[in-house]
Amino acid sequence: MISLSIRTKLFIAIFLACLLTIGGVAGVVQFKFKRSFLDYLNEQENRSLTQLETRLISTYETSGDWSALDKNRYLWDSLLRTAMRSSFFPANGDAGDGEMADESRPPPLPPFREEHKIGGLPPPRSHFMQRMDRFASRIVLLDAGHKLVRGSSRLGTPDNLHELKSQGKIVGYLGIYRRQRLTEKVDVEFADRLQRMLWVIGLLALPVTGVLAFLFARHLGQPIQTLRNGARQLTDGNYALRMKVSGRDELADLTRDVNRLAERLQQNEASRKQWIADIAHELRTPLSILRGEIEALQDGVNQPDTSTFASLHQEVSHLERLVGDLYDLSMSDSGALSYHKEATDIIALLRETLALHSSQLHEQELQVDTICIALTPIHIQGDPQRLQQLFKNLLENSLRYTDKPGQLRVSSNVENGWIDIVFEDSAPGVPDEALPRLFDRLYRVEGSRNRATGGAGLGLSICRNIVAAHDGEISAAHSALGGVEIRVRLPLQP
């Protein structure tokens, strides 16, 4: 199967569209011209018929009847010739009685006589005479009783008969059979010449159309080829790629989207490398401590007493929490973390979590203010276990990072179908630039990553995923108590 490039497809589509347009326009022009030209000839004959009416009425009034047309066999031809000249040469006006208005008009043609033959053959007839003969063959003159005076009734009576009136009395009827097609040779030749000229113009337009279609297809194909090359470089791992954006069309929008994709991939690659380095650091520290404790026991430096076992248990517990947090976070990111949502009293769940951590809060000398928590039940559709994990992580965040003695204010507020649960702690606070990054995994404000001042920096990342799974929002701001304010916004149960 032949594979065509997008540039070739564009060229074929544009060229065929132009070709069909040229052919269609040529066909319509040809058809409309024939109809318009035929209408023009019929209109000319209608003007001749109007001129003929005047002269026929004058002839009738002179003789009192139509007998003059029978007595003078050349009078009918003369009237027809004069009427046609008046319609074909309207600028010269009407001199009446078949005479010309000035000497610039050609004199009336004499009737054909036998002595005009040359070598026994009639002389060639002019285009005007040929047109007049056909004009005369389609004219019908009837008297007041619809009796045929001049013309032929073989085609029946014309559709539109003109009344001939003399002194307000109808004295006859004049009609003409309209042309249905071109009959005169000169008219047919003129139409054929125009048709040939249209086809010649169409053939000459083909190479021009081809060149324009090629240039236009190449113009559209260049940004597509650029995007294709850029996608290949992104596939090869060149995330620093940024393509130049030109124009304001859809291709320019696509180029901007690809640039944003490259920027996001570059950020994700940097985050991945930082993630691996942070995990290695977090695992290295407790493992180094465990190794040191075990080597000290082997060398007899430390004794296997209660304090030694307590230190080993603390490091193992820390490793267990770290691995558990990593597992929960990876499951949440992949969407595999199960949520069993049901109607849950969020206020009762919050108070229960605070009660479970009351001893730790007391040991940390953290005074808790719950006076602003609602006293009535407030229900949302959520997973009680995951929501309790959310509140637990937020409390542990305050326990780790709040100086002794400290304050923690927990409040709730219901507004417009949402409930806001706010955790505010006392000093220390965080810089402005650190607020948007508090929910990044493994991010901690302190650059030294001192384990004595906190955990691995995964708690708030897990909180963000839990809130997102409940169609809510979580944000960080400066607390009025001097520390950090964490606001959780969840939709109420309909």
Image (cartoon, grey):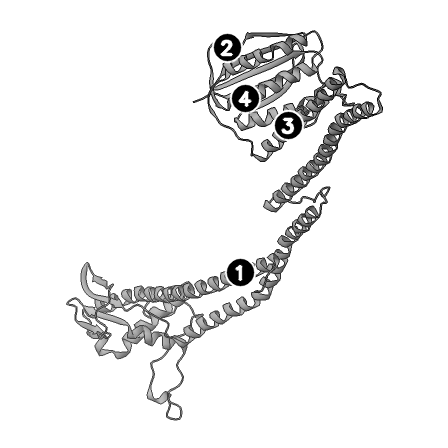
Q: Position of residue 68 (x, y in %)?
A: 22, 74
For marks 2 and 1, the one nearer the N-term is 1
Q: Is residue 461 above or below residue 68?
A: above
> Three-letter amino acid code at disc 3?
Gly
Q: Mark 3 points at which residue?
A: 324
Element carrying mark 3 = helix
Of the two numbered discs 2 and 1 in the rendering, the one whose residue sits closer to the viewer: 2
Asked if residue 244 lies left or right of residue 417, the reply is right
For image coordinates 16% across by 71% down, the residue present is 147
- Going from N to C along the chain, the mark reached first, 1 or 3, is 1
| Residue that badge 4 annotates | 387
Q: Quadrant of the C terminus?
A: top left
Q: Which of 322 and 166 is in front in this view?
A: 322
Question: Residue 309 lies in what quarter of the image?
Answer: top right
Displayed quadrant of residue 124: bottom left
Which of the pair 82/360 is nearer the observer?
360
- Mark 4–mark 3 CB contact (< 8 Å): no
In front: label 4 or label 3:
3
**Which of labels 1 and 3 is toward the front?**
3
Q: How far apart are marks 4 and 1 (CA)?
A: 65 Å
Looking at the rendered structure, the secondary structure element under dot 1 is helix
Quarter of the rendering occupied by the N terminus: bottom right
Q: Which of marks 4 and 2 is nearer the N terminus?
A: 2
Alpha-carbon distance for marks 4 and 3? Answer: 17 Å
For disc 1, the marked residue is 18
Q: Is residue 343 left or right of residue 226?
A: left
50 or 191, nearer to the observer: 191
Left or right of 432? Residue 492 is: left
Q: Is mark 2 on a helix, strand or loop?
A: loop
> Which is more N-terminal, label 2 or label 3?
3
